[in-house]
Structure formats: C-alpha cells, structure tokens
Amino acid sequence: MTECARCLDNGFFENANDNAKVKTRISFMRNASLWLATLLASAVLTLPAIAQPTQDGAQTPPSGTGKVTGAKQSSHPDWFKESFLDIAEDVDEAAQSGKHVILFLEMNGCPYCYKMIEENFKGAPYREFIKEQFDVIAINVLGDREVALDAETSLTEKALTEQLGVTYTPATIFLDHTNRPVARVSGYRNVADFKQVLDYVATKAYTEQTLVEYLEGGKAESRYSLRTHPQIQAVDDLSGVTDKPLAILFEDATCRACDALHDGHFADPEVNRALKDFVLVRLDSRSDKPITMPDGAQTTARQFAGDLGINYHPTLVLYDQGKEIARIDSMFYRYHFIGLLEYVGQRQYVKYPDSPFDYINAKTDALTAAGQDVSVADD
C-alpha cells in the first residue's frame, strides 16, 4: 500500500503499520530467498491507485465528476545513483567507497515522496553528508523494471514492493555492506528525525543496538509536556477495552511532532468525530508504569513501546478485539489520517481486510461520483 496521507507546522503527524492479517519482519540476506522471506516489520498492504494529474494539477478520478487534488511530483537530485538495479552489485560498489545503499521506494504523484525529496534530500543541511555516506537508488513501487536481488533471482519493482511489505510511500530501506537491511523508515520523516536514522546507519551503530535503542539513547533533553485532550482516557488495563476499538497514542517528553498533532489533527472537529469510535489512551513511552496489554500480558509502557518497535513519536496504534489492525507512525495528511481512523473505528477492515487504502479509495470514488472534490494533501 502506499499512502499518499499537514505539514508538521500545520498539524500533520508522522506514520507505518501493521495489518492484523499479516506481520512480517524485514531482514535481507545475500540469498534472495532469505532476503525476501525475513522482512523486518510491516504488514503487506495493497498499493492504492493514483489518478493521473491533469494540466491544472488536479487529478482525473476514475469515475464521477469530482476531482482528486494534492498529487505532487518531484525530480530526483542528480546525485541519486543511476542504477541498473542489480542490488548486490550496487552494495558492493558502495562498500568499496565506504558507503551504504539506500533504497528509496516511491510512487508518482505521492505528496509525501515529494516532501521527502525536497526537504530531506535536496534541501536538508546534511545533503552533502548523504552524498558522502550513501548511494541512493530510487524504486518505483508500481514500476515494471527488473530488480536483481542476486545472480539467481530478479523481479519487477512492483513485485519487490509487495514482497517487502511496503505500507506507505516513501519507504526508505538502508542496506549494509552485506546487502542486509539494517534500518527502515516508512513514510515521511522530518529533517531532524531523518538525520538520526542516517547517523545510526553511517556510524554502523546497528552492529551493537537496534534503531529503537539508538534513538532512545540519543534523545535530546525533555522539552514536550504531555498534553491533555478531552477524549484521552486513563486506562491501565487495555485488555478490558472490548466494547469499542482501542487507539493507543504513544508520546514522550522529547517528541518533536506531538504539539503539531494536538494543534493540528487533534483540534479538527472531523478528526474528533472519528476518534469517538475509539477508547483513546495515551502512554508515555519512557514510563515504567505497569500496564496490562490488550492481550492480557503484564508489562510497562516503556516495554510495550519497545515490543511494538516504535521508533517515532507520536505513534497511534489502532486495536480491535485485542488485535492490532493498523498504526500511524509517519506523516499523514488530514484526509488519509481520518480514513485510517474510520477504517478501524467503523470496522471497515472487515469489508476491506487487505488494506486501509482499499477503503480509502472506495470512499474517494464515492465522494467524486457524488460530485465532491477530494484533496489528499493539506498544503
């Protein structure tokens, strides 16, 4: 699935995600069967169809009279590697120069891909650092080019995307010198947060600790005070939430985007209407307060966040009947953010079990067929 989900300053919230049906772990090896079979984390979701933009920048929807707007297209920096998509060879070439390989999986028209390229690769103050430490290879998640994983195995870009369980675009996967993935970012990350991941890989900290551990150890001095919200409830026993879906908001005192979430999405009436379908609970990822997990096991908020592999704040994990259905842990614009809440809160996942974007696309088709315009981006 690729999410094409307000500027942090205007309330967007950074998200990636588990689907209740499929949970995989990424762990590439030189042998292609292992390279594809041991995926690190993320559910396999279906890539949403993106309409083609018209001359005025709007998109022509597949049906109806409304328009879908907000698609954005960026050009790659000229220092992105012109790869023949022989990944093992690319990794060997990078290793000879002391570099790592970044696979940047993107989709045409995706506003998050646009923002990532413009802010994190073209405009970031660490642009030269990326050029010195990494070879960046772009992969079109809907593309038909052949990607060679090793001498025996190749598959199309689209097939590779499906095998990797890509949930949102962009997906940024970092490979070490043995062609093994050592870090993954799903969706957009702001400039400061993305630099932390770059440092984790460039310094080879992955040989000693996980990304979650690295980020926890390198957190800046506390500056965010956990904020109230009228719908946040104090619940320690999460297994007792059975009458409604459960939304768990993970924050901590170093969160850069949490104020933006509260001032943006959480201040929006339509978002709050969607949240009424949930029991909304907030957990401090740095707290050792005892809690009971949705499955009944005893733990702490800190350990729970670690077990879930949460490496970005704020993260919103959506449960129903004790099972995780989806999560938001990278940037989503308002339309997709609400769509994901509806997917779980209205139990649309029962009708659309493969992907939240199957529901969101159906909702978009219904709105455009009724003559309404839909914007998938907020700025």
Image (cartoon, helix red, strand yellow):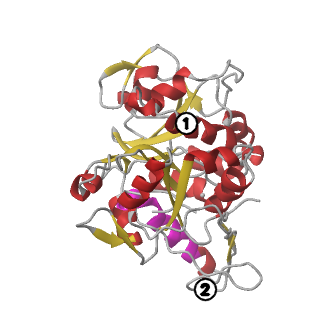
Residue appearing at x 32%, y 62% in the figure: 149
The count of marks equals 2
Name the quarter where the C terminus is drawn: bottom right
Please provide percent x and percent y for residue 113.
61, 60
Q: Is residue 351 visible?
A: no
In the displayed structure image, the side of residue 172 where residue 36 appears, left or right: left
List the residue tagged with mark 1: 312
Please provide percent x and percent y for residue 326.
43, 48
Element carrying mark 1: loop
Element carrying mark 2: loop
Q: Looking at the image, which is closer to me, 329 or 21? A: 329
Dominant SS type (magenta): helix
Please provide percent x and percent y for residue 125.
75, 44
In the displayed structure image, the side of residue 78 where residue 299 appears, left or right: left
**Label 2 to label 1: alpha-carbon separation:** 38 Å
The answer to which image quadrant residue 157 occupies is bottom left
Query: Mark 2 against mark 1, which lies toward the viewer?
Result: 1
Task: Kindly identify the amino acid type of the residue bearing the numbered disc 2.
Answer: Gly
The answer to which image quadrant residue 323 occupies is top left
Q: Residues within 10 Å of mark 2 (few under 14, many from 20)?
A: some
Q: Which mark is residue 64?
A: 2
Q: Which residues are magenta?
A: 349-366
Residue appearing at x 45%, y 59% in the figure: 356
In the displayed structure image, the side of residue 60 where residue 169 appears, left or right: left
Residue appearing at x 66%, y 86% in the figure: 65
